[in-house]
């Protein structure tokens, strides 16, 4: 066994600088089997460089205990002992240089046994200079067992007295959920990223009169499938303006309609021999659907920055979302497609000039849904980010719809159409969308692709 207690102090003074360091430490070791100890270290510096004063102090303190795994060939150690570590550490720093002041504090609690890790980390950073001020606080709780990792991260930030944001992110093996809000003095936003969101009360266990779903759900008891949407037990509205309404079961005692114009109608079961619409005969539609997530994972950096080339790279990275093969009869063919964003992590963008991206730059990025006949584009739909947050964040959320895409080529015979997804940039500045982390992921689900041929 070995026990060490150390107390030391050093001071140095020159004409234009001075520094001091103090260290208190305790360390105990038992034959390379285990160790434990504590450390308290303070270091201060001050100097004058070209008539500019630079002063800073750093402090590190903590305690730890460590159990070392046995050496190969040991016959006296317990079977299965693979070592472990527990530590509590705190680091504080303060620095001022001319008109720049910086301070940071990091607290960390960690425990490890075999491949099982538990971590708590809190970091606070504050910066101020002659024209700006920023403070950010981040708290992370994370556990890892084998290949599985679950974390909770809370971030609060205030910038220049003009912008504030706070968000909480729940990440389990790349599946991200959370909520957050931001306020720039002109507009404030609060966003929830969950598959479902329900409102209930503490006195009504299991009863939720308001439920909002972003992904389909199947009741395990009844087998009932609930698609994406808002589910309300009761709603009272003085006035309702509805662009499109889908009613499963409508019972009306009396209706007075002067002029009925239906822009879009959806009927689950319609028996019609021939449907004539402005002298067009409609064949039975062909469609495919997939409620499962289609995703791409891992780091990916497209080579190109222009719209078409970058989109082509992303479409190749994604698997085709859906494919339809039909026997064309020489009429025009209409396609309708949709999908929902279901997973997104480490999606970001870089400019070719390596500069910062403005809010307008990020709003020119696009998520693109395209229909191809072979390698020939038939039509596409594209959407900008649904939300731009902070200094660099952007998010694609909700649904993307490609409706009423028409193939005007009067093809006859077997023809295959493919639905593809990708990212691109509509802005004049050269920017590419990337997944910049090995755990990066972007995926969509609830995919629908329908074809309908129109014949004279």
Image: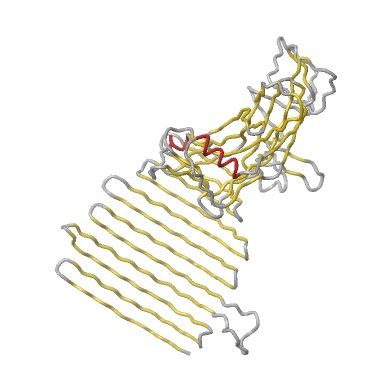
Name above or below for residue 243 compared with residue 220. Answer: above
Which quadrant is the C terminus positioned in?
top right
Left or right: residue 289 versus residue 111 is: right
Left or right: residue 441 versus residue 455 is: left
Give the residue at x 57% y 43%: 192
**How many numbered marks does the figure carry?**
0
Left or right: residue 389 versus residue 126 is: right
Q: Quadrant of residue 118?
A: bottom right
Name above or below for residue 266 compared with residue 207. Answer: above
Q: Position of residue 120 (x, y in %)?
A: 51, 63
Give the residue at x 64% y 32%: 372
Q: How is the image coloured?
A: secondary structure
Name above or below for residue 107 compared with residue 8. Answer: above
Q: Position of residue 1 (x, y in %)?
A: 48, 90
Name above or below for residue 281 compared with residue 229. Answer: above
Q: Residue furthest left?
A: 15
Give the residue at x 48% y 80%: 36
Left or right: residue 336 versus residue 168 is: right
Q: Nearer the viewer, residue 156 or 425?
A: 425
């Amino acid at each position: 066994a070995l026990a060490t207690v150390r107390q030391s102090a050093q001071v140095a003074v020159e004409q234009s600088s001075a520094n001091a360091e103090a260290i208190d430490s305790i360390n105990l070791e038992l034959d390379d089997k285990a160790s434990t100890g504590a450390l308290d270290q303070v270091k201060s510096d001050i100097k004058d460089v070209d008539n500019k004063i630079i002063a800073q102090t750093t402090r590190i303190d903590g305690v730890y205990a460590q159990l070392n795994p046995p050496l190969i060939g040991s016959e006296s150690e317990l079977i299965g002992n693979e070592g472990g570590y527990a530590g509590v550490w705190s680091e504080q720093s303060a620095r001022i240089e001319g008109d720049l002041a910086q301070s940071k504090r990091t607290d960390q609690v960690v425990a490890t046994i075999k491949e099982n890790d538990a971590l708590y980390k809190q970091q606070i950073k504050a910066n101020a200079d002659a024209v700006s001020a920023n403070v950010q606080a981040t708290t992370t709780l994370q556990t890892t067992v084998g290949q599985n990792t679950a974390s909770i991260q809370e971030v609060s930030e205030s910038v220049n007295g003009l912008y504030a944001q706070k968000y909480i992110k729940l990440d389990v093996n790349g599946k991200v959920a959370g909520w957050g809000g931001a306020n720039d003095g002109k507009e404030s936003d609060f966003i929830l990223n969950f598959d479902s969101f329900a409102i209930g009360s503490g006195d009504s266990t299991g009863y939720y009169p308001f439920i909002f779903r972003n992904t389909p759900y199947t009741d395990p008891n009844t087998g009932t499938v609930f698609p994406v949407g808002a589910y309300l037990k009761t709603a009272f509205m003085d006035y309702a303006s509805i662009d499109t309404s889908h009613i499963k079961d409508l019972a009306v005692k009396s209706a007075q309609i002067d002029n009925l114009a239906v822009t879009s109608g959806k009927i689950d079961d319609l028996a019609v021999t021939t449907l004539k619409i402005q002298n067009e005969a409609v064949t039975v539609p062909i469609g495919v659907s997939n409620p499962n997530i289609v995703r791409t994972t891992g780091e990916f950096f497209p080579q190109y920055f222009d719209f078409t080339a970058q989109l082509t790279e992303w479409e190749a990275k994604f698997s085709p979302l859906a494919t339809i093969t039909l026997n064309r009869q020489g009429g025009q063919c209409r396609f309708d497609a949709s999908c929902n964003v279901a997973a997104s992590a480490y999606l970001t963008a870089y400019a070719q000039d390596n500069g910062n991206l403005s809010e307008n730059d990020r709003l020119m990025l696009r998520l693109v849904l395209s229909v191809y006949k072979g390698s020939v584009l038939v039509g596409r739909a594209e959407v900008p980010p649904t939300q731009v947050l902070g200094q660099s964040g952007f998010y694609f959320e909700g649904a993307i719809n490609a409706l009423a895409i028409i193939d005007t080529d009067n093809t006859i015979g077997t023809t295959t159409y493919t639905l593809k997804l990708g990212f691109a940039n509509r802005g004049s500045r050269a920017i590419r969308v990337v997944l910049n982390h090995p755990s990066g992921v972007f995926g969509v689900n609830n995919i629908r692709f329908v074809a309908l041929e129109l014949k004279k």
